[in-house]
Amino acid sequence: MSNSSSITHFLLLAFTGSRQLQLLHFWLFLAIYLAALLGNSLIITTIACDHHLHTPMYFFLLNLSFLDLSSISTTLPKSMANFLWDTRDISYAGCASQLFFFSFFLSAEFSLLTTMSYDRYVAICRPLHYETLLGSRVCIHLAAAAWTCGFLNALLHTANTFSLPLCQGNAVEQFFCEIPPILKLSCSTSYLRELWLSAFSAFPFVGCFVFIVVSYVQIFRVVLRIPSQQGRHKAFATCLPHLAVVSLFMTTGIFAYLKPPSISSPSLDLVVSVLYSVVPPAVNPLIYSLRNQELKAALSQLIPGCLQKQ
């Protein structure tokens, strides 16, 4: 039996004991990471450089891409290094930092997705008041509120989680540090404090989820009343990417944290953790660029322009 004061490092979950498969996982994660890095960087650069995209919707999308890029950079590099060097170690401080930043970016992303649903609601349901309700100052305040909520939530949970005495060793049942596997290492009764805190902090996220659902109910009611097919298509084209990202984010996250214990297994938990921590940041740029004609047009102008300068 050990306590938290004697733990200097943690052991992350290994995907496999085979050296060949470890290298295969390294190259697979490297490809996913480079795809996420390229896709999100292109969106950030395109929106920042094209003044036609300096609107609230693209301002929030730029923030979302930055959060996705930051989130995947919190987990994958360390995991890839472990695959490459055939190790499972992560320092105590490194684990705490990883848990904090992953919680920070994940919480901020959910808050930002809620803000983006409000942006779509105002744009479609109250278009005449769009510039008034979503001026530049308001957009900055909303984005800052999303980042601040994420920071405070992560700080609260990280401080509370690592203040618990850890009596069950140092082997983390996950390929990166997050709250649930750390709680499994705590003493039998001490983890209840964090569970109560998690339940309490879940209320704002439930409120955000309800807000997103209500917003899209109102949006679809208005869109279906649009007489022209072209108008409906344009409205859906701006909403469906955001709705797809929200659905991917919510379904993978809910299944990961709320799945029944009866179907839980190490291999399933590992697959699910990859789905909600690795896949969304890599797929989101593709989702937003597929149906967004303005973004695709700006991107097609940006790439040739960069090539000509070189």
Image: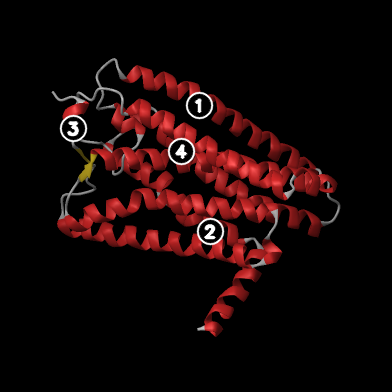
Asked if the residue at tag 3 contacts the one at tag 2, i.e. Cβ–Cβ closer than 8 Å, the answer is no
Asked if the residue at tag 4 contacts the one at tag 1, i.e. Cβ–Cβ closer than 8 Å, the answer is no
The vertical placement of 254 against 274, above or below, is above
Q: Which residue is label 4 attached to? A: 253
**Residue in the picture at 64% in, 56% down:** 58
Under circle 3, the secondary element is loop
Specify the quadrant that holds the N terminus.
top left
* Left or right side of 27 for 112: right
* Left or right side of 74 for 310: right
Q: Quadrant of residue 170?
A: top left
What's under tag 1, amino acid-wise? Ala
The dot on residue 285 is 2
Q: Which residue is label 1 attached to? A: 202
Label 2 crowd bin: few (<14), some (14–19), many (20+), radius 10 Å: many
Q: Position of residue 26 (x, y in %)?
A: 27, 59
* Residue 223 seen in the figure: no
What's under tag 3, amino acid-wise? Ile
Camera-side residue: 124 or 262? 124
Q: Position of residue 279 (x, y in %)?
A: 43, 51
Residue depth check, mark 1 versus mark 3: number of the one nearer the observer = 3
User: Real-space Cα distance between discs 2 and 3?
Assistant: 39 Å
Under circle 4, the secondary element is helix
Mark closer to the chain start, 4 or 2: 4
User: Real-space Cα distance between discs 2 and 1?
Assistant: 28 Å
**Residue in the picture at 37% in, 18% down:** 193
